Image (spheres, rainbow, N blue to C red):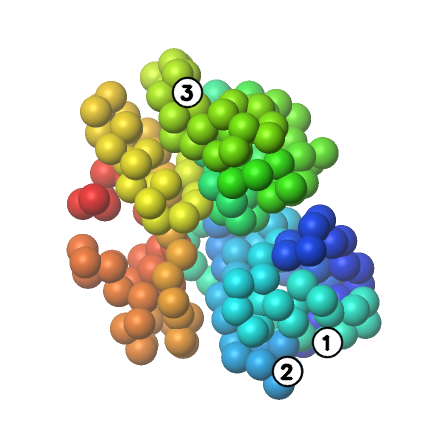
Amino acid sequence: MYCVKVEKVVRHNKDTATLIFDSILPSYPGQFVMLNLFGYEEIPLSLSSPRSITVKAVGETTKALVNVNPGAIVGIKGPSGNPFTPTDTKALLVAGGIGIAPLLYLHDYLIAEGANVHVLYGARTADELVCLERLKSYEVATDDGSKGFYGSVVELAELKPLRKYERIYACGPEPMLRAFHRLLKERRLLDKAEFSLERLMRCGMGVCGSCVLPEGFRVCVEGPVFNAAKLEW
């Protein structure tokens, strides 16, 4: 473990914030860190840039992180895990909720590689949509219709010519990913797609077995990014 300082905190809403560190973490989009806010449980978090995490308050540790002040010191293990496979052609990013976090990093990386990137981003309400200013080309969906398409991000994706994209990347809640997996399977596009999965992780290095999928993959080692065709949903 090593330590970094929180240089800046950007609070997007009452439950979500981006913590910007004073150091660049050598990494690739899709990788995660095991983060230790001292006095709290160590947890896995995807990087939203080479020097930031974007986190939503869902438990004791994440609530403390969202409310942390600049100058706080946090412990870091990693970055770890398999990243997304980049492309320099047409890419579609499909995000649900806080699943936007690793896709923000990927978005910036792909654009720097010269890719044509479009984002479909869904949330329950407009207030939960974050970091839209970072996205070059996007459409949003909200469950309550408060912004953009009225419905889920998968329902929005059903209306799109998905075959025109060379690579498709997705991250979000498991029900959303399962529904999107079904859509891609129906259209025979699973081989084009990569999913970033979230699971409870205790160790982050493949020892404890807490993040093993039914297929036998450990999310922390063989993931968190998987080719969609390898998932048996």
Q: Label 1 to label 2, Cα distance in Å? A: 8 Å
Q: Is residue 222 visible?
A: yes
Is 76 displayed left or right of 21 in the figure? Answer: left
Q: Position of residue 166 (x, y in %)?
A: 40, 23
Question: Which circle's residue, 2 or 3, is located before the other in the chain?
Answer: 2
Is 203 displayed left or right of 46 in the figure? Answer: left
Q: Position of residue 34 (x, y in %)?
A: 52, 70
Q: Label 1 to label 3, Cα distance in Å? A: 41 Å
Which circle, 2 or 3, is nearer the viewer? 2
Element type at mark 2: loop
* Nearer to us in this view, 11 or 217: 11
Q: Which residue is mark 3?
A: 165
Q: Which residue is mark 2?
A: 38
Question: Which circle's residue, 1 or 2, is located before the other in the chain?
Answer: 2
Residue type, label 1: Ile
* Residue drawn at point x = 63 percent, y = 49 percent: 49
* Nearer to us in this view, 195 or 200: 200
Q: Label 2 to label 3, Cα distance in Å? A: 43 Å
Q: Please identify the quadrant where the C terminus is shown.
A: top left
Residue 120 numbered mark, or none: none
Q: Are marks 1 and 2 in contact (CB under 8 Å)?
A: yes
Vertical side of 12 occupied by 211: above or below: below
Q: Is residue 225 visible?
A: no
